[in-house]
Amino acid sequence: SQRVVIIGAGIVGTNLADELVSRGWTNITVVDQGPLDMPGGSTSHAPGLVFQTNGSKALALLATYTKNKLLSLEKDGQACFNPVGGLEIATTPARLEELKRKLGYAASWGIEAHLVSADQCLEIYPHLNKDLVLGGLHTPTDGLALAARAVQLLIERTRAAGVRYIGSTPVTGIEQGAGRVTGVITPSGTIPADIIISCAGFWGVEVGAMVGLSVPLLPMGHQYVKTTAVPASKGRNELPNGANLPILRYQDQDLYYREHGEQYGIGFYNHRPMPVTAASLGLTPSHVNEQNMPSRLEFTPEDFEPAWKLSQEIIPALKESQIADGFNGIMSFTPDGGPLVGLAPNFENFYVAEAVWVTQSAGVARALAEVLTTGKSTIDLSECELSRFDQVQLSPAYVKETSSQNFVEVYDILHPFQPKESPRNLRVSPFNGRHRELGAYFLETGGWERPEWFESNAELLKQLPAKWQPVERDAWSAQFYSPIAAAEAWKTRTAAALYDLTANRRLEVSGPGAVHLLQRLTTGNVTKRPGSVTYTLLLDGHGGIRSDITVTRLSDEVFLVNANGNTDVAYLSREALKQKKITPERGVQVRDITGGTCCIGLWGPRSRDVMAAVSTDDFSDKGLPYLSVRRAIISGIPVTAIRRSHVGELGWEIYASAENGLRLWDALWQAGQPHGLIAAGRAAFYSLRLENGIRLWGTDVTTEHDPFEAGLDFALQAGKDGYVGHSAVKGRSRTTATRRLRSLTIDDGRSMVLGKEPVFFNGQSVGYVTSAAFGFTIGKPIAFAYLPTTVNEGDSVEIQYFGQRIQATVVPEIVYDSQMSHSGV
Ligand code: FAD
């Protein structure tokens, strides 16, 4: 068995040892700098509240697994989870609405939850102040993880199964060479390893630095206090930590509560961010106790003052108590709030599982154990992938600013489209200046500024035919939206529009081994002659879709690959290295060319007229058929043009070197004016792509879906075998699939949904919306949703939006395609 070393014996490291040993791995060592009975990390003082419901499906499912596992982990009749339930209360109308949205998430991810009235809140939680509470969300299966106890039981159980634990031993270095780590260095010697997994919690940055890896997390102080005994709680619970009342969240004031016997525990997030550098904390003492551990900093009572006042207001019984003990505990925050899980980009065998809350701990451990033992986690990990960040997002300044902001916003009501306020303008396309002149409204993705719509098109609303007029929206879906998108969609369908596609990831894959690599990893046939374009899938070994990419063969050994994100870059680069190592004659380079290039989508029925005005190259159907590529000159600029669109219209993706971008834009812009050309933004794009049945990876499609479920089986090349995932999908079909991604339209033609809402069929929650938009061409909102294959085209379903049921109908996958060209590309 491979020699595994896990750094860290907190709730994550010990769960990982357990998940690996239960899958038959035998040679596992866990090292911790602290004493094993209480290692002194965040787990050692964690109050352990587990609220499962989350906007992220992955985080919710990881939490549910954690809860179930801790419930089953018991000794002497006591489990490591106390299912007291969870109550989230609203004291503002906005929060009440937010809880309705949360109720939807719970239904989407299979968690039982109920909206409860103010009176019912009082019944569930009699200590609450009736005058303040407007209502709540009750989740009966939430509760308290006994995290420190779980660690001890896991150590006991895994030790008995052969896991070796080494306490009070810091890892001070990691041996490495040629993309592999080979052992951890400690003061008592080196422990050789075939696989190393860092579960070092907020020390992750320091451990990462040992192998030159930037781990984007920020350790932050977070205040937690215990009160003196509360008379109203006298005799209710077992001492010292028993609890019967549900765990309570008062998010309007950034507070949460649990019982500790007769005392209350209060956690507070609305204090100034308190970033910490783990390296400054010094060595873990040889004896750790509740009061003396590195993850526990001196309490700063002045920061807690408002929390104490607010707590006594919401739970008047606390007026009979005082603060007995408080501390500023350290935990990890990340730039996007998600955990950091997975293989380090530059290594074959160094993994990380950090910035993980107790809430998701066992789930994350299982997921990583599955990755290690079978190559794939049952729960899609893309939102947790360590490699999801771009270089510009790994700088310490970026990590500090964005992670601090996440701390500030941890309980805030956040719109799904709400952009970061800062840092902005980290990455801009060459057209950015023109976009600004046109009054672009920008949202941010991966550091890139992307126009959503252009105020300059507001004038067009006056000309908009009645059928295209946008409908009035509810206040929530009207945020980060402008009716101008309707005008931009109209112009795309009736004239022509320029879309900035620069932020989309582009790679150059080249070398004598390029064909072999792409042929081995994709479901398509990329051996076609230069000039061909192939939309294809990257599957995992189990047939799940790890990405969808477009492979354009520019010459025998050079391919342009349109990919989805940094995780794709890490995967392709790693596979390229592996191939080169095994077969040096099949050398292949993977180069991210996104920043040095730019891309414009010129789409719409008049786009050929626009092109004719700026280029003498042949852009006719015959000269450049659908899904083919040519090098061409546009207004003196060398470009690569691919005939395809994501919106179901005639047009091309036009690539150029970044320094030529501005001239390219200007040339197309000027040539397009007589033909009604406009600049259009992402809001119009989103609508048109949904009408055209185009899936978005990460949103509509993940590793949890196979090509048949996702409706992407057309991308499996008939007769091709031997590619990654082939043996898994062999024998599967649309008939064997039990669910399908379906297109739905909203019957009343106006009620919006935004994504992640549950879908009901015959009164049962059967699936969830992946993405949605108003379909401007068809004059109705449109949504994609995974539904059982027993639900058919023409069937009526209901989507739950803020607690209301909206009638929708299952419609054909592609509701609009002027080109009748496609599908799916
Ligand atoms: P840790 O428990 O910190 O374990 C990491 C281990 O790695 C440590 O034992 C450390 O000694 C060891 N280590 C680090 N570096 C080295 C090295 N170089 N060599 C050897 N060993 C090393 N989460 C919830 O889900 N619910 C809550 O209610 C909750 N409340 C919280 C309240 C407070 C006040 C705080 C601070 C956190 C809270 N959290 C909560 C967060 C939660 O405690 C942590 O996210 C979780 O415990 C992290 O577990 P871990 O195993 O990753 O890290």
Image (spheres, rainbow, N blue to C red):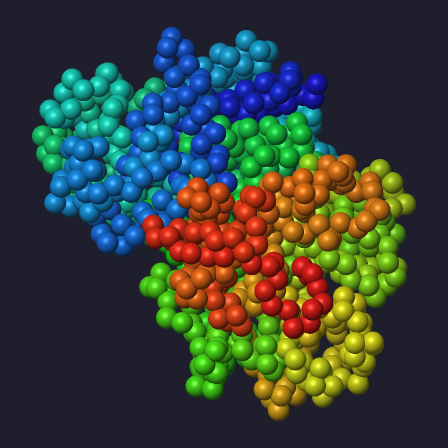
Quarter of the picture holding the N terminus: top right
Q: Nearer the viewer, residue 189 or 420?
A: 420
Looking at the picture, tell me which residue is in the foreground, 619 or 784: 784
Left/right of residue 482 with respect to residue 788 in the rendered view: left
Residue 534 vertical placement versus 641 (above, below): above
Which x, y percent locates residue 764?
Answer: 44, 41
Frontmost residue, 746 versus 448:
746
Q: Position of residue 575 (x, y in %)?
A: 75, 43
Task: Look at 71% across and 43% down and name the residue there.
Answer: 733
Which residue is rendered at x = 88% and y = 61% of the image? Answer: 529
Give x and y (percent) for residue 510.
81, 56
For the point 62% across and 88% down, which residue is it? 675
Give the quadrant of the C terminus: bottom right
Spot occupied by residue 158 in the image (x, y as percentages of width and height): 54, 14
Q: Count up the numbered dots.
A: 0
Which of the 4 image quadrants contains residue 64? top left
Residue at the spot 64% in from the left edge and 35% down from the top edge: 376
Res 624 visible: yes
Q: Is residue 456 in view? A: no
Choose between 194 and 464: the one closer to the eye.
Answer: 464
Residue closest to the far bottom: 674
Residue lying at the far left in this picture: please name it: 320
Relative placement, left or right, of 242 versus 455 is: left
